[in-house]
């Protein structure tokens, strides 16, 4: 379990009039709750940034400017953080301005109103409840950090493993190439066949290693450090790496206007590469392949729904879900080569950005893959 | 006078393939192999210490070396009095973007991802030719 630091356990007090702050502090001390008194709103903000379990703020210390400053600070809080505020308000003789301010306070989100005159038990219980809630938030932060670390470690492990596995694999591949080049004439048909099995085994393992890496990389970047990128660039990168296959298949690729999205460029590029690559791989022999890439605003904004559609062989309805599973394949390797990881990688990336990926398809007519990403 | 290329590489298979790619690209060069990072660092230090010392025209540098890594060798090269601007092509089978970024940050002139196909490996010859003609 996460152990909170002293700073994270304290209650901040902003009550500039009279002995209010000192009295509150004493009331909480009885319950062994540590306090720190802020002389003004700026000081409170600074102390909040250092860490705090809760804040008790007297209504009169909050003018519109202070509420806006607090609001601005809350806006940039990480997703685990929802700092609790206990606001002390007068129960009677309330002016229109007082009510106005109360209305403004709603922007603070997590706040509890406590009416004056104060009863010690009321303040103490409100402080305890706030500290408990904040404690859970700090625990979530700690778990988030360990998850991020675990993901980073896993990715590093995948890179090292794929590097170390690739070394002997490279020798197998390259030396079977050399045997074929230099000793072809002394091999009989059976020997050549053995060699070609070795070569295709090495090629397949190479593809598996590359895809395992991409799968590990799919969850490596946290959503917080992504930037706005135009979707056109990652698509171009994907099309460039597929240039050979596109040329060979004679595919026509229609790209409609694409928006910018909040996503890591290499992730979007990987999705395009896998989906367009699939369209090329599963094309029909008797029709010119046409692939269309588009985007529309999704039903639940702020997101975009991208689509990659083709006029290929299509997917039987029974397999619309299974195709996204890791190592799931619908065809023999001899007919369509592949690792069965392409769509699993796409799904993992899309889910990383809390999106969704699905397919609509009619066998013999074509498929359209859709995925949603943050705008 | 033939241009000198120093190959810092501990894996005999890859040394063999570098020689093959020189042959395939018909490069008229002299190859000198350093099998680990210490040997490479000593070599650079010796050139720096010798008044008439000549730097190689190109260094091919593996990253995954015994003892110190290739990155450390690259740092030594870039801090060398004589050889700090010698072109260096980093060779590795690592696909980690962090390795690539580190190589260019430390001043590598090129990055060769060691492939698993013989024909692909031979492309190193063109990379060497370009690096030599740039220098």
Image: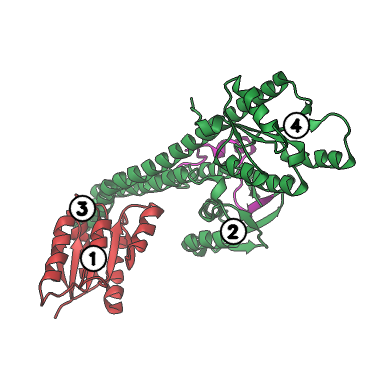
Chain colours: A green, B red
Q: What residue do we see at 38% from left, 44% from top?
A: A156
Secondary element at image label 4: strand
Q: Which residue is mark 3?
A: A187
Disc 1: host chain? B
Residue A314 lies in the magenta stretch: yes
The residues colored magenta run A303-332
Q: Which residue is mark 4?
A: A88
Q: What is the CA distance from the residue labelled 1 to the residue labelled 2?
A: 37 Å
Q: Are marks 1 and 2 on the same chain?
A: no
Secondary element at image label 3: loop
Residue A342 is situated, as x and y percent measured from the top left of the image, at 50, 46
Mark 2 or 4, closer to the camera: 4
Q: What is the CA distance from the residue labelled 4 to the residue labelled 3?
A: 91 Å
Q: Is residue A140 above or below residue A350?
A: above
Q: Are marks 3 and 1 on the same chain?
A: no
Q: Which comes sooner in the sequence, label 2 or label 4?
A: 4
């Amino acid at each position: 379990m996460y152990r909170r630091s002293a700073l994270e356990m304290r209650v901040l007090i902003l009550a500039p009039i009279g002995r209010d702050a000192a009295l509150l502090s004493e009331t909480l001390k009885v319950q062994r709750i540590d306090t720190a008194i802020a002389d003004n709103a700026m000081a409170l903000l600074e102390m909040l940034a250092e860490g705090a379990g809760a804040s008790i703020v007297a209504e009169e210390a909050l003018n519109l400017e202070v509420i806006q400053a607090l609001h601005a600070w809350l806006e940039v809080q990480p997703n685990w953080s929802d700092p609790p505020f206990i606001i002390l308000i007068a129960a009677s003789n309330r002016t229109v301005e007082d009510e106005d301010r109360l209305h403004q306070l709603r922007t603070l989100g997590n706040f509890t109103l406590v009416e004056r005159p104060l009863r010690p038990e009321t303040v103490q219980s409100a402080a305890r409840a706030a500290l408990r809630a904040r404690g859970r938030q700090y625990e979530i932060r700690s778990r988030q950090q360990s998850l991020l670390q675990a993901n980073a470690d896993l990715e590093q492990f995948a890179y090292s493993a794929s590097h170390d596995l690739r070394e002997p694999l490279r020798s197998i591949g390259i030396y079977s190439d050399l045997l074929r080049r230099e000793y072809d004439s002394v091999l009989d048909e059976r020997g050549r066949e053995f060699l070609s099995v070795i070569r295709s085994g090495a090629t397949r393992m190479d593809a598996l290693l590359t895809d395992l890496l991409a799968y590990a990389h799919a969850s490596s970047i946290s959503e917080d450090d992504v930037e706005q990128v135009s979707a056109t660039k990652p698509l171009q990168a994907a099309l460039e790496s597929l240039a050979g296959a596109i040329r060979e298949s004679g595919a026509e690729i229609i790209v409609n206007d694409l928006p910018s999205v909040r996503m890591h460029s290499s992730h979007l590029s990987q999705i395009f590469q896998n989906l367009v690559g699939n369209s090329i791989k599963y094309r029909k022999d008797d029709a010119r392949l046409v692939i269309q890439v588009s985007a529309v605003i999704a039903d639940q904004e702020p997101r975009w729904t991208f689509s990659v559609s083709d006029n290929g062989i299509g997917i039987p309805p029974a397999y619309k879900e299974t195709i996204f599973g890791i190592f799931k394949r619908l065809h023999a390797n001899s007919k369509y080569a592949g690792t069965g990881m392409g769509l699993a990688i796409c799904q993992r990336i899309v889910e990383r950005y809390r999106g969704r990926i699905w397919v609509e398809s009619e066998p013999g007519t074509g498929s359209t893959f859709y995925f949603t990403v943050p705008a | 006078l033939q241009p000198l290329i120093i190959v810092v590489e501990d894996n005999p298979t890859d040394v063999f393939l570098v020689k093959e790619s020189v042959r395939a690209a018909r490069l008229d060069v002299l190859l000198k192999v350093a099998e680990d990072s210490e040997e490479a660092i000593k070599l650079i230090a010796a050139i720096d210490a010798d008044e008439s010392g000549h730097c190689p025209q190109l260094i091919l540098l593996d990253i995954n070396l015994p003892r110190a890594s290739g990155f450390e060798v690259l740092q030594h090269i870039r801090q060398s009095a004589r050889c700090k601007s010698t072109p260096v092509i980093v060779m590795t089978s690592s696909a980690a973007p962090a390795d690539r970024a580190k190589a260019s940050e430390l001043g590598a002139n090129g990055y060769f991802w060691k492939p698993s196909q013989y024909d692909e490996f031979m492309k190193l010859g063109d990379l060497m030719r370009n690096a030599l003609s740039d220098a």
